[in-house]
């Protein structure tokens, strides 16, 4: 009887091991969760020191040093962005433009060294995440009446996502003119950023810095749920084979001892 009890205990332990392996594997495939990250990160709850007009046809590039992207993790999927109104402004009217293109990727040059060539600044792995017409509802950007920075507005959800690689980040925005203009919260003089701009859609070159008025931007991201590391498929299969063999052998031993049948 003691042998049978020990065998059952060993079998229960093996079953527990199998359950753990299955649970870990399921956790590894858990869904992502959404989050938001302000860039530069220092302005999440602090208003910028200037404003930037938003509504004219333009192409701008801004590079952010990795030290300003503390809210981003390697592997984060960037799925959209938004801005906020500057200071005390009326809430925004309905906004419409025929073309609003966004590119994300690493920069070939650090802040302070961007060239005047839009394409030359874009590093390997740059992705066009947004294209086509853009429509923003009335009051997409609202004003709080001067009580701290205004809230971020309606999210511009991308057509496709960009996976952050942990390097610096180059944001390229190119837009035809909107039907109206608004003033966005922005900052100038932030160490680790540089902005270049041209007043035309799909421009190939940009003016030097153009006052470096960088809009305070909020990125929408999706992150994988942190979970225990699952074993490699081959390791899991081997483990299950060993467990199965152990149960089989234990069963045969019990059967031989108590029934005399091999």
Image (tube, grey):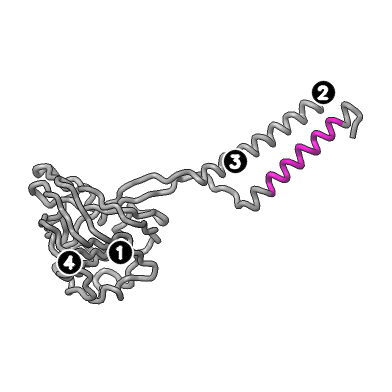
Tell which of 14 and 175 is nearer to you: 175
User: What is the CA distance from the residue labelled 3 to the residue labelled 2?
Assistant: 32 Å
Of callouts 3 and 2, which one flags the residue occurring earlier in the amino acid sequence? 2
Residue carrying label 2: 1
The residue positioned 26% from the left and 63% from the top of the image is 101
The CA span between labels 4 and 3 is 53 Å
Q: Which residue is mark 1?
A: 103
Which residue occupies the extreme top position in the image?
1
Tell me if 153 is positioned left or right of 65 in this view. left
Instruction: Report x, y in % for residue 92.
Output: 12, 49
Q: Are marks 1 and 2 in contact (CB under 8 Å)?
A: no
- Quarter holding residue 126: bottom left
Classify 240 as above or below 116.
Answer: above
Is residue 181 highlighted in magenta?
no
Specify few, some or many for label 4: CA neighbours under 10 Å numbering under 14, 14-19, or 20 or more: many
- SS at mark 2? loop
According to the picture, the residue beneath numbered tag 4 turns out to be: 58
Asked whether residue 228 is in view, the answer is yes
Residue occupied by mark 3: 22
| Rendered location of residue 103, percent (x, y) | 30, 64
Query: Of discs 4 and 2, which sits in the foreground?
Result: 4
Q: Report x, y in % for residue 44.
A: 23, 49
Residue at image location 83% in from the left, 30% down from the top:
254
- The magenta segment is 238-255
Residue at x 41%, y 56% (from the top left corner): 74
Q: Indicate yes or no whether the magenta region holds residue 250.
A: yes
Disc 1 element: strand
| Viewer-side label of 3, 1 | 1
């Amino acid at each position: 009887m003691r042998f049978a009890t020990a065998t059952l205990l060993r079998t229960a332990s093996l079953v527990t091991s199998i359950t753990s392996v299955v649970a870990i594997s399921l956790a590894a495939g858990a869904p992502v969760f959404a989050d938001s990250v302000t860039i530069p990160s220092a302005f999440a709850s602090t208003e910028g020191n200037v404003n930037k007009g938003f509504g004219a046809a333009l192409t701008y590039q801004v590079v952010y040093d990795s030290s300003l992207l503390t809210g981003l993790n390697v592997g984060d999927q960037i799925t959209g962005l938004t801005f906020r109104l500057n200071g005390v402004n009326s809430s925004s009217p309905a906004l419409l433009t025929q073309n609003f293109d966004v590119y994300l990727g690493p920069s070939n040059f650090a802040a302070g060294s961007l060239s005047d060539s839009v394409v030359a600044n874009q590093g390997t792995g740059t992705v066009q995440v947004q294209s086509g017409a853009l429509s923003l509802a009335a009051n997409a950007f609202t004003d709080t009446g001067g009580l701290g920075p205004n809230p971020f507005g309606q999210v511009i959800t991308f057509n496709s996502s960009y996976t952050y690689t942990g390097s610096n980040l180059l944001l390229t925005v190119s837009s035809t003119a909107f039907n109206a203009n608004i003033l966005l919260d922005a900052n100038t003089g932030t160490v680790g950023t540089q902005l270049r701009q041209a007043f035309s859609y799909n421009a190939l070159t940009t003016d030097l810095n153009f006052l470096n008025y960088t809009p305070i931007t909020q990125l929408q991201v999706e992150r994988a749920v942190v979970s225990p590391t699952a074993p490699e498929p081959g390791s899991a299969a081997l483990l299950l084979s060993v467990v199965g063999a152990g149960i089989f052998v234990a069963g045969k031993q019990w059967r031989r001892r108590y029934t005399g049948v091999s």
